[in-house]
């Protein structure tokens, strides 16, 4: 009957205590790695030769003179991180360091130092560059050049020399660029002088050929036949005359189209003629007088007639005057038209002459402009040459200034013993913990009860601590006995039927503690008053007879082969209720005796004789005896040793038990290290502490029963 229950194992969740458990379990690995790294770091730190460092600080600026030159442009030395980084690289470049190597004769000195003869410059350069560190003071233009060496004086000398060579290099570069620039400008000046001389000769020839006077030459050589001012006045006069003609023509046309009465009124307003105005005024006066006399004297009056005659005379004068004015206006208009036409002809002729003169003098003008341009450029070149000569003479010490010279520092910067040891301790601890967790990750063996219940889906009936002895020797008050009593209690609760009293203990591999577990379990049952028999059915490697220190000359195999009776092979033990059946000697021709009918009959007989019968067995993996026993006895316990075999092996062992029909009661976790794994301490730690305290108060309290003497190999039959 299968008394096991299927249940869902609790979900595995990592907790801080799980990490702490790994650290405690793997503390040996952690401590070993920690000590190895820490000790190695300490030894290397004290073995390494001391390294000294010296630093020189320099102020660097972009290329500029100490004072402003003749130019009007002001240079603003704004912070440029790219320029500063470029200077870092220049300081460590071959251009600077090769000169330092040559000046200080480092090829020979370092060759003697390393006993390599004279070193090549490229090798010395690599060594020197590895000892240099260039940095910048934050938000400043100060550069710090640090040099490391095993000799303090050498570090200071090299650092100062690098700064000096860098400064001299910048100054030489400035001077070289100035000289090259001046040479280029002077060469260009000669070219311009030659070109100006040739152009001046050509201009003189054209001036003579075209008959250009000095005044015209000063005015640009394009002086026309009519001066520009005269031409402008002439054009203005023509425009005024054309306007007068247009006005006269408009007035004349309007007056000729008027009636006699309208003409008189229009003429009086249009032409301010004094005579006409006087006659028109007299005419108006006589008309008014005539009208006055006619009303009083009548038409026949002589005075009235005289006035009428006067009006006729005045009317003729007005007509004559109007006709004269119109004729004069027409004559004036015709004269103005002729004048406008004459002025237009003069302006047109002047323009034609001016254009012809300009076309004729164009080559001269072009040459003269070219000459002026070349003269202007030569003047600028001359001014620039003078400016560069002045600036070349101005000191330029400000572009690189040594602020703090390097001095020998006799305090080593390497190795930093305190820092190295601290880092060794930290790194060693980190590597040790990391290695411990890595090993734990690779370790697939059983570690916790949760591992068992999750992987095997079977209950854990007992947890056995590490270094357990044999309870028959230690007595019932042994600090380890309580673990087996807990196991016994769980087994009794799992056995639903009291008739199921035959139990075997199996394991997946060798050395997991089957024999110790089954013997101590049987001892606990026997100490409780039950009649118990332990059968050593591990026919290939029997071990229980060694625990009891009895002979294994006859036993189970002799009974199964019908060589001895059951009473002859069962032996007694120091515990009255515990009997023992050795395995006996197994002939090679009788390997399958456990599967015989005689074995089944033996099991039925022992069930009647004893309250509990425990069968020891070989490992179930690779040996068929354990599978046979699992199928023939009532119940099976599987022993799994803590952190020994991988989980797939224990799972396979369980599957083999179930495959042959074995009734698996549960799992026994064996060899638990209670000191390093607190997950199991509550299983037996309390009892261990309790009994340990009692041992001090009752030192002589030992079991009345003592095991057989070490030398005893006698057979003690029960019957």
Image (tube, rainbow, N blue to C red):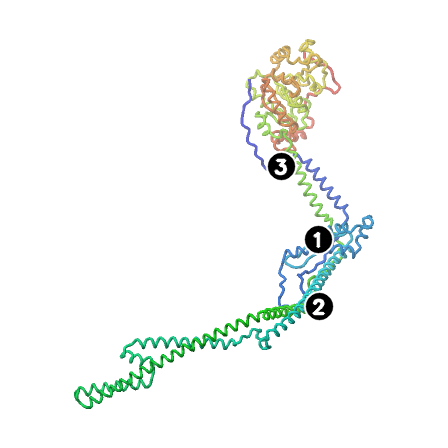
Q: Residues within 10 Å of mark 3 (few under 14, many from 20)?
A: some
In the displayed structure, would residue 414 be above or below residue 705? below
In the rendered image, which quarter is residue 296 located in?
A: bottom left
In the displayed structure, would residue 117 be above or below residue 612? below
In the rendered image, which quarter is residue 516 located in?
A: top right
Q: Secondary structure at mark 3?
A: helix
Would residue 113 be found to the left or right of residue 601 on screen? right
| Residue 478 at x, y percent in the picture | 66, 26
Q: Which residue is mark 3?
A: 20
Which of the numbered marks, if any, corresponds to residue 393? 2
Q: Are marks 1 and 3 in contact (CB under 8 Å)?
A: no
In the displayed structure, would residue 187 be above or below residue 229? above
| Residue 66 at x, y percent in the picture | 68, 66
Structural distance between the alpha carbons of marks 1 and 3:
44 Å
- Looking at the rendered image, the quarter that the N terminus falls into is top right
First in sequence, mark 1 or 3: give its number.
3
Q: Residue at x 23, y 85 (%)?
A: 287
| Residue 257 at x, y percent in the picture | 30, 75
Q: Which residue is mark 1?
A: 133
Q: Is residue 699 visible?
A: yes
| Residue 455 at x, y percent in the picture | 58, 27
Q: Are marks 2 and 3 in contact (CB under 8 Å)?
A: no
Q: Secondary structure at mark 2?
A: helix
In the rendered image, which quarter is residue 698 located in?
A: top right
């Amino acid at each position: 009957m299968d008394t096991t229950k299927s249940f869902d194992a609790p979900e595995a969740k990592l907790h801080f205590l799980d990490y702490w458990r790994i650290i405690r379990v793997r503390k040996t690995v952690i401590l070993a790695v920690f000590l190895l790294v820490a000790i190695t770091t300490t030894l290397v730190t004290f073995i390494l030769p001391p390294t000294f460092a010296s630093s020189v600080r320099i102020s660097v600026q972009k290329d500029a003179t100490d004072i402003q030159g003749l130019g009007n442009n002001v240079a603003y030395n704004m912070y440029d991180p790219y320029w500063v980084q470029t200077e870092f690289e220049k300081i460590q470049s071959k251009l600077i360091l090769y000169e330092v190597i040559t000046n200080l004769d480092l090829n020979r000195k370092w060759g003697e130092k390393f006993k390599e003869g004279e070193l090549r410059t490229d090798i010395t350069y690599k060594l020197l560059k590895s000892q240099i560190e260039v940095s910048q003071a934050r938000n400043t233009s100060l550069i710090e050049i640090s040099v490391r060496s095993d000799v303090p004086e050498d570090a200071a000398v090299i650092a100062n020399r690098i700064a000096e060579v860098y400064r001299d290099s910048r100054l030489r570069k400035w001077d070289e660029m100035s000289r090259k620039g001046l040479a280029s400008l002077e060469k260009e000046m000669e070219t311009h002088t030659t070109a100006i001389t040739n152009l001046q000769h050509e201009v003189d020839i054209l001036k003579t050929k075209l008959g250009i006077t000095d005044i015209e030459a000063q005015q640009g050589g394009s002086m026309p036949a009519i001066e520009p001012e005269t031409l402008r006045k002439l054009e203005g006069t023509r425009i005024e005359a054309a306007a007068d003609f247009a006005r006269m023509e408009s007035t004349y046309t309007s007056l000729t189209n008027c009636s006699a009465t309208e003409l008189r009124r229009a003429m009086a307003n249009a032409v301010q003629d004094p005579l006409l105005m006087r006659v028109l005024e007299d005419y108006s006066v006589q008309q008014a007088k005539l009208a006055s006399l006619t009303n009083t004297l009548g038409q026949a009056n002589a005075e009235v007639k005289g006035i009428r005659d006067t009006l006729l005379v005045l009317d003729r004068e007005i007509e004559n005057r109007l006709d004269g004015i119109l004729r004069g206006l027409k004559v004036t208009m015709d004269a103005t038209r002729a004048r406008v036409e004459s002025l237009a002809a003069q302006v047109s002729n002047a323009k034609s002459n001016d254009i012809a003169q300009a076309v004729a003098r164009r080559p001269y003008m072009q040459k003269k402009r070219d000459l002026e341009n070349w003269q202007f450029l030569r003047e600028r070149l001359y001014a620039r040459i003078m400016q560069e000569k002045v600036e070349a003479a101005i000191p330029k010490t400000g572009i690189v200034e040594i602020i703090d010279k390097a001095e020998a520092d006799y305090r080593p910067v390497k190795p930093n013993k305190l820092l190295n040891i601290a880092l060794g301790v930290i790194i060693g601890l980190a590597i040790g913990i990391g290695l411990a967790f890595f090993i734990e990750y690779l370790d697939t063996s059983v570690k916790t009860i949760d591992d068992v219940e999750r992987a095997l889906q079977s209950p854990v009936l007992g947890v056995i601590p590490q270094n357990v002895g044999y309870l028959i020797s230690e007595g019932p008050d042994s600090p380890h006995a309580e673990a087996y009593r807990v196991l016994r209690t769980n087994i009794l609760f799992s056995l639903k039927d009291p008739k199921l009293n035959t139990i075997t203990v199996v394991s997946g591999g060798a050395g997991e503690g089957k024999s110790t577990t089954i013997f101590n379990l049987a001892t606990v049952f026997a100490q409780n008053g039950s009649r118990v028999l332990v059968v050593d059915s591990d026919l290939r490697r029997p071990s229980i007879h060694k625990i009891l220190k009895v002979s294994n000359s006859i036993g189970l195999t002799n009974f199964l082969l019908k060589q001895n009776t059951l009473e002859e092979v069962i032996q007694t033990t120091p515990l009255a209720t515990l009997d023992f059946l050795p395995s006996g000697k197994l002939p090679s021709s009788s390997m399958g005796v456990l599967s015989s009918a005689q074995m089944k009959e033996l099991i039925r007989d022992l069930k009647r004789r004893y309250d509990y019968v425990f069968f020891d067995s070989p490992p179930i993996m690779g040996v068929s005896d354990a599978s046979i026993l699992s199928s023939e006895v009532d119940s099976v316990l599987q022993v799994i040793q803590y952190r020994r075999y991988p989980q797939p092996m224990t799972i396979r062992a369980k599957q083999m038990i179930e495959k042959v029909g074995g009734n698996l009661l549960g799992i026994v976790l064996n060899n638990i290290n209670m000191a390093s794994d607190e997950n199991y301490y509550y299983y037996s730690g309390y009892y261990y502490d309790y009994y340990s305290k009692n041992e001090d108060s009752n030192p002589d309290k030992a079991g009345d029963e003592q095991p057989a003497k070490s030398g005893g190999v006698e057979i003690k039959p029960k019957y």
